[in-house]
Amino acid sequence: MTWFKKAERRAIRSRGGVAKTKTGHYDGKVRGQPVEIKAVKKDNRFRIGKTVHKSLVRNNGRYIFLNARGQSKSMSAKSVSKKIGGGKWFKDRTYPHKFLKREEVF
């Protein structure tokens, strides 16, 4: 299991949640709310996928951001929407995405 998957499951469980075992629109649930984990080790920005983000906003979900120091911070998907703003989504990968800088979270 990769560093990211271990950190993802640990972050969800430490908040009393349940991590999903299958891939889907989010990584797990905490107190009935869907959560998505975003972690960075070397990069200075988190990649926010459009499809997952829209699903989290619709379902009052949250992001849990992890940094290389082991710190974490939870933020509502609606708050993330305000930070990433409107406008076009990048399409240089197989899915549309935007970036949120690490400094905007921590």
Image (cartoon, rainbow, N blue to C red):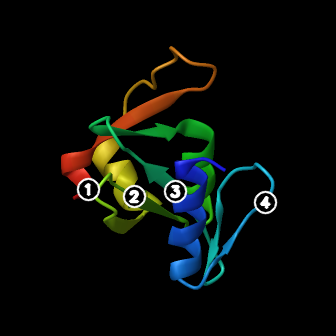
Tell me which numbered mark, 3 or 2, is placed earlier along the sequence. Answer: 3
Please give the label number shown on residue 9.
none
Residue 30 higher or lower than 26, as above or below: below
Q: Quadrant of residue 87?
A: top left
Q: Is residue 59 left or right of residue 80?
A: right
Front one among 7 and 18: 7
Q: Which residue is mark 3?
A: 37
Label total for image: 4
| Coordinates of residue 88 in the picture (x, y in percent) | 42, 24
Graded by Cα atoms within 10 Å as few (under 14), some (14 to 19) or many (20 or more), the crowding at tag 2 reads many
Q: Residue at x 78, y 60 (%)?
A: 21
Q: Amino acid at mark 1?
A: Val
Q: CA distance from mark 3 to mark 1?
A: 13 Å
Which badge, 3 or 1, comes first in the chain's sequence? 3
User: Are discs 4 and 1 less than 8 Å apart at CB?
Assistant: no
Please state which of residues 91 and 72 is positioned toward the viewer in this rendering: 72
Task: Report the front residue among 59 and 43.
Answer: 43
Q: Residue furthest left?
A: 103
Q: CA distance from mark 4 to mark 3?
A: 14 Å
Seen at 66% across and 50% down, the residue is 1
Looking at numbered disc 2 in the image, what kind of residue is underneath it? Phe
Whether pointer 4 and pointer 3 mark residues with C-beta atoms closer than 8 Å, the reply is no
Amino acid beneath label 3: Ile
Q: Where does label 2 land, which residue?
A: 65
The reply to whether the C-beta atoms of the residues labelled 1 and 2 are less than 8 Å apart is: yes
Using a 10 Å C-alpha cutoff, classify the residue at mark 3 as few (fewer than 14 neighbours), some (14 to 19) or many (20 or more): many
